Image (spheres, rainbow, N blue to C red):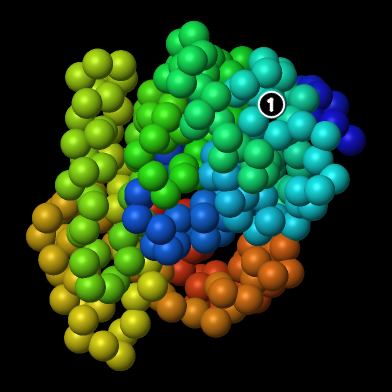
Amino acid sequence: MSYKDVKRGLPQRDSRTIAVINQKGGVGKSTTVVNLCACLGENKKKVLIIDFDPQGNTTSGYGIEKDELEHDIYDVILHGQPIEETIHETCVKNVFLVPATIQLATAEIELVSAEEREQKLKKALEPLKDEFDYIFIDCPPSLGLLTINALIAADSLIIPIQCEYYALEGVAKLLESMQMVQRDKNPDLEIFGIVMTMFDSRTSLSNQVVEEVRNYFDKKVFKTVIPRNVKLSEAPSHGLPVCKYARVSKGALAYARLAREVVARG
């Protein structure tokens, strides 16, 4: 069944577009997108995920075979493919995905000479604004043109920060980029929330990092902290979010709590 068939009869919605972003890799960004969106879907929220990372980890995390894709987000951004024709259903009811493949890696170069190169994603998403409660953009771990596109398309950001040494390294640069986009292109862009990931309650370091980040960002930090959890690490190899793979694991329960916080924030 195509998305065009699925969307018939869906009520109009005032969607929030959230870019999940940190230019530092390995902070749990795609893990957060996959599992937070799955929990929102299970809470009867209509969710669209844009996998905007050439690594395509969110695409794989929902078990979508990249080799079998006819179109992906690259075709939307570079070739004007209607985004509705690239939307896939996922294993979670109410959650839909626009996939990415390694082909997206060439987009940074190809966009340089494109007209309105920083507005491509924003324009592509416009027809979908009233169809979802949330649109999530999984950003690449960089501050190039793809990420700038995401910052302009989004109305808010979720920033995952890992509970390790140098947790805030690079965040200042990210905030600088956010402020530049606010000033020039997207004045309404704001931080929706900071989520602490890879928390290990057995170490004083994790607790120190959480305290440091809370002191810096204050109420922007979600109360829910995502723990290090074996099931969270295993789930992607099965092409499933953790709520489908190990529902009562610590990782699944943490993302369920985070989803409730997201909904409560609006």
Quadrant housing the C terminus:
top left
Question: Looking at the rendering, which quadrant does residue 202 occupy?
Answer: bottom left
Q: Residue furthest bottom?
A: 202
Q: Which residue is drawn at 56% across and 59% down?
A: 35
Dot 1: what SS? Answer: helix
Q: Residue at x 56, y 31 (%)?
A: 107
Q: Which residue lies furthest to the left in this view?
A: 215
Q: Residue at x 27, y 24 (%)?
A: 181
Position of residue 250 in the picture relative to residue 186 (left or right):
right
Position of residue 195 in the picture relative to residue 91 (left or right):
left
Quick one: label 1, few (<14), some, or many (20+) residues within 10 Å?
some
Residue wearing tag 1? 75
User: Could you say which is closer to the camera, residue 145 or residue 83?
Assistant: 145
Q: What percent of the width, then of the height, locates residue 126? A: 55, 16
Task: Let me know if residue 41 appears in the view.
Answer: no
Looking at the image, residue 136 lies above or below residue 206: above
Position of residue 195 in the picture relative to residue 66 (left or right):
left
User: Could you say which is closer to the camera, residue 31 or residue 147?
Assistant: 147
Task: Let me know if residue 62 appears in the view.
Answer: yes
Quadrant housing the N terminus:
top right
Looking at the image, residue 48 lies above or below residue 42: above
Q: What percent of the width, then of the height, locates residue 173? A: 21, 43
Q: What percent of the width, then of the height, locates residue 77? A: 60, 23
Question: Looking at the rendering, which quadrant does residue 209 occupy?
Answer: bottom left
Q: What percent of the width, then of the height, locates residue 148? A: 38, 29
Looking at the image, residue 1 lies above or below residue 170: above
Position of residue 224 in the picture relative to residue 50 (left or right):
left
User: Could you say which is closer to the camera, residue 132 or residue 50?
Assistant: 50
Q: Residue at x 42, y 63 (%)?
A: 26
Q: Which residue lies furthest to the top in this view?
A: 115
- The amino acid sitting under disc 1 is Asp
Q: Which residue lies furthest to the right in this view?
A: 1
